[in-house]
Amino acid sequence: MSLESFNKQSRASLFRCLSSGTLDLLVIGGGITGAAIFRDAALRGLRAGLVEAFDFASGASGRSSKLFHGGLRYLKNRRFRLVWESCQERNLHVRLNPRLVRPLPFLVPLYEGRGVSRAEMRLGMFAYELLAGLRNHRFHRFLSRQATLMLVPGIPTAGLKGGCLYYDAAVDDNRWTIETLKDGVRNGGVALNYAGVTGLLKKDGKISGVCVEDRNQAGIYEIFARSVVNATGAFSDQVRRMDRPDASQLVRLSKGTHLVFRPEDVPLSVTTVFSSPLDGRSLFLVKRDGCFLYGTSDDWEDADPASPAPREGDVNYLLESLRRFMPDAGLGLEQVQFIYSGLRPLFWSGSKEQCGPETSREDFIEVAPSELVSVVGGKLTTARITARRVLDKVIRRLERRAAWSPCRTHEVSIGGSNEAVAEGFSHWVRRCPSMSGHIRDLYQRYGVDADEICRELARVPTPRPHGREPIRPELEYLCRREMVCTLEDLMDRRFGFLDWSCERRLQYLRYNASVIQGALGLSESDFVGQFGDYQEHLERLHSLPICMQAA
């Protein structure tokens, strides 16, 4: 398979490809863990497939805090291995994939008699940077009271002693997951969304494949594989019970809710970390392109994992914590532009004493008697390491083939080498200097695949984009090369960078209706139906709860 057929129109042929012959590996789940396993397998030379019941990155992998971090707060719980791996991975990807993972400064204000003391912060940062191999983007530094207020003028001044500035990294989680998947496809793998597993196939008591339903165009397929990996996150236990109805619980869901503010409403100029005055949990206001992202709550959740709607209690907790921390900032319901909740599928040991903030983010890999491999837990930051562990287990039990190579994900950039990306960017800026800013954005989002969009930009005169709004060549590229099946796929996960405003997202769809209909092969009635579905989706999952709007 190649990216030329990674689109809605090619689904029937892709299903035939998956169901003909026997794969070396089939991954169930299209979040970052499944995507990383799929890419690793394809790079090693395995015949790999991936199926996802909904859209890629539509679960926890597209609803995270958008951070690629070492996990400073995990030091409190002595999760030294997790922090070490996270820091090493952050440093690796800042170097290997700088277009996607970018260093970000974080500021922790330090107060007299409350919160973390200067001595504790110094010790914590020494341990943090030591676990990073002293190779972080920049070393931490302590700031005076005056320098702190220049960066974060909105914080309370009473008792302020100064601050600590350190570096982690930021990532667009949707784009990171999609680019990882595309790299697996580019290297010979076959991946399909809206392909729900309805049953497991067995031979002599061992898993030999799966039954899959094409939820987009109807149809049932049998896909055979020498090894099957269950990487379905919040749905892991459901898949495990297809194999063994009495399988014990391995996953518990922790819900995190995030609020989005306009940058002009937040009196800060840098990402700020603080402890909630309500319960001491670590919260942050992350300065990103075009917004401040604020979160996150962390509570056990038993609701439907397919639709984690924000609740009044989640919003009240975040806003009250912010009001008490920065009472003069005036940040309330009226300033919230967007909201989303995600469910973290954490490995559950069964202990009654575990609570969300203290539960390990480390991964756990189970190999059932049927040889179904299930991976639960883990973090966005450490997904590459998790994938390597899973593949090492899978290959040990399969008859290894000489053509398979060792893991190469630590040395191969996603979406083209940094040199190739820079060369392509330079070439097209020389050709289209008036579009240099937009071309830079394209190469940061799509790597060397941006060449295809830029060729169209140069061929057909195109108006300059308004702000960050995608223009026609980019829209058509996404529909041809990124398996977009619905308007929600397009707006939430391919154009996740577009705008943190529900109404402006709907306006974009209205304005570009004819282009989108043609690119996705939608009739006018299909477009109207999907538009209504997306509007309802925004109201239910990305707007303040109705009871709070009325208030």
Image (cartoon, grey):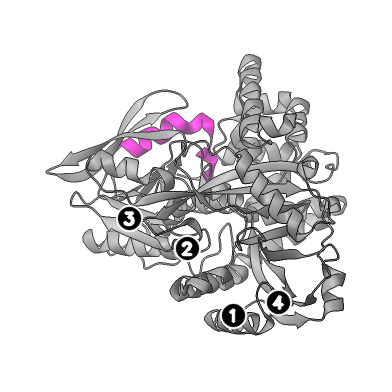
The residue depicted at 83 percent of the width and 42 percent of the height is: 465
Q: Secondary structure at mark 1?
A: helix
Disc 1 or 4, which lies upstream in sequence? 4
Q: Amino acid at mark 4?
A: Gly
The label on residue 537 is none
Viewer-side residue, 407 vs 134 = 134
- Main SS, magenta region, reads helix
Q: Secondary structure at mark 3?
A: loop
Disc 1 or 2, which lies upstream in sequence? 1
Residue at image mark 4: 113
Viewer-side residue, 166 vs 274 = 274
Locate residue 503, reporting x and y percent: 76, 32
Residue at image mark 2: 358
The label on residue 124 is 1
The label on residue 350 is 3
Query: Comparing marks 1 and 3, which lies closer to the viewer?
Result: 3
